[in-house]
Amino acid sequence: MDDLRPDAIPESSGSTSQQIVGESIERGFLGSSSEIALAAVETGPEGEASRKKLSIGAWLAIGWMGFIILIAVLAKTGIFTWGDPNESFVSCARRGPFSQEGTAANFILGCDSNGRDMLARLALGTWTSLYVAVGAILVGFSIGGLLGIISGYFGGKTDTFLTGLFNILLSVPGVVLALALVAFLQGSAETASKSSISPEVILIIAIGIVGIPLVGRIARASALSWTQREFVLAARSQGAKHRRVIIKEILPNVLPAILSISLLGIAIAIVAEGTLAILGVGVRPPTPSWGNIIAADRGNLFTSPHIVFEASLMIFLTVLSLNMLGDVVRARFDVREGLL
Amino acid sequence: MSKPEPLKSPDTAIMAAPPATLLEIKNLTTYFRSSHGLVRAVDGVSFDLNRGKTLGIVGESGSGKTVLARSIMGLLPKAGLERDGSILFEGDELINLGPKSMRPYWGAQMAMIFQDPMTSLNPVMKIGNQISESIREHLDVTKQYAKELAEQLLISVRIPEAAQRLDEYPHQLSGGMRQRVCIAVALACGPKLLFADEPTTALDVTVQAQILDLMAIAQRERFMAMILITHDLGVVAGRTDEIVVMYAGRIVERAKTETLFSHMKMPYTEALLQSIPRVDQASHVRLATIPGRPPDLINPPAGCKFAPRCNYAQDRCLQEEPPLREASPGHEYRCWFPVDTPEGADALARNRERGTTASGLIFNPPTPALANKQKS
């Protein structure tokens, strides 16, 4: 009862456990022991959680992602180049490490079947692949996330309709849907105007649409569970509008879940770009991407394996890194939910 | 005298005090359509509440207390809801208002404190923002002013180091502190009516009294009416002006607090009171319970809803539902054989002789000695 008197408010320095102590023990008792209380806070569960160390694998993943983003930006802006990705050296065609044709003298990673420098092509291809994948996920993330949250928050007929939409999109195999979308978008772009949309943007839209239901369903499930929480009702009982509740109460809580799925989504989009390239609707040559490097030289897999191998290795490491980072994000935010 | 006299009438407006009645509920029903049938969660509830007064709503879980409060505030989800009757708040009818028209009332006129402070605060929003959010929604003030107001509110709910707390997250506070924050949020826009839905159920016994005292202080300071919902008669005993006892979505007894405790008429109220453990009991006395469970709200029993669990039950109780009758002005109850009346004593004696009540319940009232002690 002490703290009901206004003059009994303990003058603690604001740490949680200190204040709890201040509630129960006389103030004078606590006076000089603020250091002890502070130490108690630092070893508390919250303190540990926020200082949780990242594993070596996570650091490697972060390092790899930083590395390829750097390469991509350098190659695209031309601040530092590894040579012209489109310049052909006929004498070096199909030469490279492990190639039956022998190694190419001046090119560490060898050359492709047209004699173009693999290093330069992979560097620029990194840009293309990341650009398409990240763009596609931004489309899926924003549209899918928004629809999912709306679906989970409002429920009822809205939910039935949007879930139905997601299910229809999911029922068509992703590759087929993306193929159809690319064909449709390219066709309409060419008939609509002479200045057609770049093939990268078409890919972004197509893969993005395929990604909408994936992100949307996760967002819906998460929003559904957060909507049931009492603080949403509490916010409404204070007169908050739906829009405000969605943006301020639901979105920040749903974000970790869709952020984590989106990191995995970038990985999926990179693979999807490669798949579409092999099916012949990817980024148009001569612009390199990891996918169309593999697509162009998959016929030379047995004689010059280095071409396909190098591009595949880039995809493999990137997808692996993104998966690890997705796990890290999820684990990080699970900790906070556990503290509730 | 053709000249207009602008200063003529204001004194009448000032002198006329606002009507004492703040909230007037008439025959409020709240049903939910479900796949099994209509759930009659609140079934014909009427009561008045004056400004600055406290009303306690008491009942077991499932008796419709929470639904009643949320129905009055219009916070129930629309799907499958059937709501009827009349809710007059300062003379304005609220029953037909949708969420859009209710918004000016929410927070500014009536606010609610929820049961569990662990879940009624947003875990990812700073405490200061949670408080100032509704201030900025309802009052046209600057961000800085709202923040200062939030700090004042935290000080008024006796939170130490208020300025620093504004930038903390809910998980950094203890349960009692969080409930204080919830109270601050509810008080932010100076509501005239505060619903407290089991505000202390989720808290430690040691902080329960503090929170209840704090709410009483806030209520006095602001001349705010309060509806205190609880299952614990001990909580409402010294803190309410009037008590409504609910059972199966209906009011079974309504009286001034002193009247209810001294002259209860409803066997259910008596049973609730007897189920509170007493300090003067011997330490190994079996705790008194009310046998059975609250009735199915989809197919309630025909007669008195409490008859299947009542020690006074007679044949009439199983066939006819008793109406709400008046024992004295302001004291209503719903029973054919009320406690402490010749009819009630007769019914009790008959059941004791028979060994069972009319509903087949084995007659087993708490020891008469205990019952007598309570009445004295």
Image (tube, coloured by chain):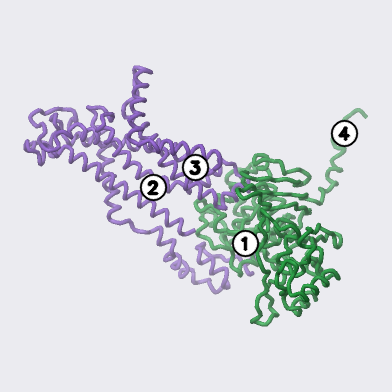
Residue B193 bears which disc, if any? none
Disc 1 designates what residue? B158
Q: Is mark 1 on a helix, strand or loop?
A: loop
- Tell which of A45 and A95 is nearer to you: A95
Q: Which of marks 4 and 1 is in front?
A: 1
Circle 3 sits on which residue?
Answer: A149
Judged from the image, the secondary structure of the residue bearing numbered disc 3 is: helix
* Disc 1 + disc 3, Cβ < 8 Å: no
Snapshot quadrant of residue A26: bottom right
Amino acid marked by disc 2: Ser
Disc 4 designates what residue? B5
Q: How far apart are marks 4 and 1 (CA)?
A: 49 Å
Check the residue under mark 3 and report the chain it is in: A
Label 1 CA crowd tier, 10 Å (few <14, some 14–19, many 20+): many
Q: Are marks 3 and 2 on the same chain?
A: yes
Q: Colour of chain A?
A: purple
Q: Which amino acid does label 3 sit on?
A: Ile
User: How far from the left and from the top, in percent, is residue A3?
Assistant: 62, 67
**Where's the C terminus of chain B, which quadrant?**
bottom right
**Chain coloured green: which letter?**
B
Q: Where is residue B57 in the image (x, y as percent from the top left)?
A: 71, 59
